Image (cartoon, grey):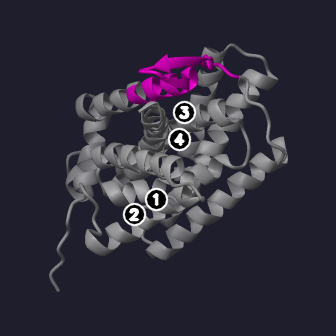
Amino acid sequence: MELFIQLTLTGLTNGAILALAALGFVLIYKASDVINFAQGEFLLVGGYVTYAMIGQFGLAWPIGMLITIAVSIGLGALVERFVLRPLIGEPIISVIMVTIGLSSLLRAIVSTIWGNTPKAFPSFIPSEPVKVFGATIGADRLWAIVIAIVMLGLFTFFFRRSKEGIAMRAVADDQQAALSMGISVKKIFAWAWSIAAISAAVGGALVANIVGVSQELSHFGLRVFPVVILGGLDSIPGAIIGGIIIGLLETYTGGYIGHGLNQVIPFAVLILILMVRPYGLFGQEIIERV
């Protein structure tokens, strides 16, 4: 029973962080129909910028996180303005290849500035072991769950209650109708990329606080694809639930079976979902008549 509780809490931690990263992925797809293969590198940049602010410059962690968020907003806006906007109207394969190239560019920039050697992350979340129903788990994982839930709650409130959030939902539903109502679609695209970068940066900082900062952070982003395929490419609730499901599946498989199968199970789920329900658990089924 103790092992089950420990694995469950670990899985919920991973799932909450995956949901944060997947949220940004879904936002970009909903707003602009772009599949962002550089989402993992947004996590990487967030982790390293947080490391630089807190570990190298010695700033207090609230200030360091605020600067990381500001850098993420700038990165998302720059990518949308100078990389994606010139490709409006181009074939989808061109946009996909550009995001793949962007991922390589961001990895190269991080490698040039900080090198490839893993670094100890300056812990800004308490990490002492705590007992939960008899199981021992690091406090940093519990805090990561709480922080991820708060962030997801704030994003949900933003989408449902704020003027900009409602405009983003309108653009996601119908760009032409949104334009006719005076909504700036280009501005909404910039918002979507900036929010995606923020959610990924916070996720990257949480992962780095637990496992350290290294190029492996970008690999964490690869696990976003099974999450969004499971939940649905265009579903924000699906991103949250998909993250939790994949996080728990990974942890249970690694804890009870092992042999590296926890690295395989998310992509096995991805293939299964594509075969059985290609639009995901909560995705919108689109039927085209020809």
Kind of residue at disc 2: Val
Q: Secondary structure at mark 1?
A: helix
Q: Is residue 124 part of the magenta span, yes or no?
A: yes
Horizontal side of residue 274 vs 130, given as left or right: left
Q: Would you say the residues marked 1 and 4 are in contact, meaning their CB atoms lie under 8 Å apart?
A: no
Kind of residue at disc 3: Val
Horizontal side of residue 230 vs 84, given as left or right: left
Please name the residue that numbered disc 4 is placed on: 200
Please name the residue that numbered disc 1 is placed on: 266
Instruction: Count every numbered label the image shows and give the total.
Output: 4
**Residue visible at 54% across and 26% down?**
137
How far apart are the alpha carbons under marks 2 and 4?
23 Å
Task: Using a 10 Å C-alpha cutoff, classify the residue at mark 1 as few (fewer than 14 neighbours), some (14 to 19) or many (20 or more).
Answer: many
Horizontal side of residue 124 vs 280, given as left or right: right
Please name the residue that numbered disc 3 is placed on: 202
Q: Nearer the viewer, mark 1 or mark 3?
A: 1
Picture disc at residue 269: 2
How far apart are the alpha carbons under marks 1 and 4?
19 Å
**Residue visible at 44% across and 41% down?**
15
Q: Secondary structure at mark 3?
A: helix
| Residue 251 vertical placement versus 88 (above, below) | above
